[in-house]
Amino acid sequence: MKDEYDFSNAEQGKFYVPAEDIQIPIYLDKDIAQYLNQQCGGPTDGLQALVNDLLRKDIEIAKRVAL
């Protein structure tokens, strides 16, 4: 390492990302991933949309049952 570094042209917060904007990866079990890939036609953006739709429906069912 150098004894000194020049930060005079540095930009504070250049790579900062708010915690609420960070998307964590979700790993599916192999059998689930294979089934969902078949349903949406392959591992593309369609998989994300399919999983989101299924989860939204499940959340709606859970809300109805909780009433």
Image (spheres, rainbow, N blue to C red):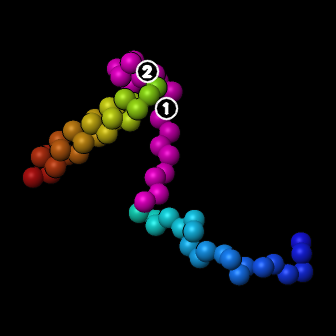
Q: Which residue is depicted at the point 46% across and 67% down?
A: 18
Q: Label 1 is placed on what type of residue?
A: Asp
- Residue 62 appears at what percent x and percent y? 20, 46
Q: Does 32 sit above or below residue 5?
A: above
- Nearer-the-camera pick, 28 or 2: 2
Q: Does 21 sit above or below residue 41?
A: below
Residue 66's tag is none
* Quadrant where the N terminus is found in the figure: bottom right
- Nearer-the-camera pick, 57 or 49: 49
- Residue 11 appears at what percent x and percent y? 61, 74
Residue to which mark 2 is pinned: 42
- Nearer-the-camera pick, 55 or 45: 45
Q: Which residues are magenta?
A: 21-42
Q: Label 2 is placed on what type of residue?
A: Gly
Real-space Cα separation, disc 2 to disc 1, in angstroms? 16 Å
Say if residue 32 shows up in the picture.
no
Residue to which mark 1 is pinned: 29
Residue 15 belongs to the span the image colors magenta: no
Q: Quadrant of the rendered structure where residue 57 is?
A: top left
In terms of sequence position, does the residue under pointer 2 or pointer 1 come before the other? 1
Q: Residues within 10 Å of mark 1 (few under 14, many from 20)?
A: few
Q: Is residue 20 left or right of residue 56?
A: right
- Nearer-the-camera pick, 21 or 13: 13
Q: How many marks?
A: 2
Camera-nearest label, 2 or 1 = 2
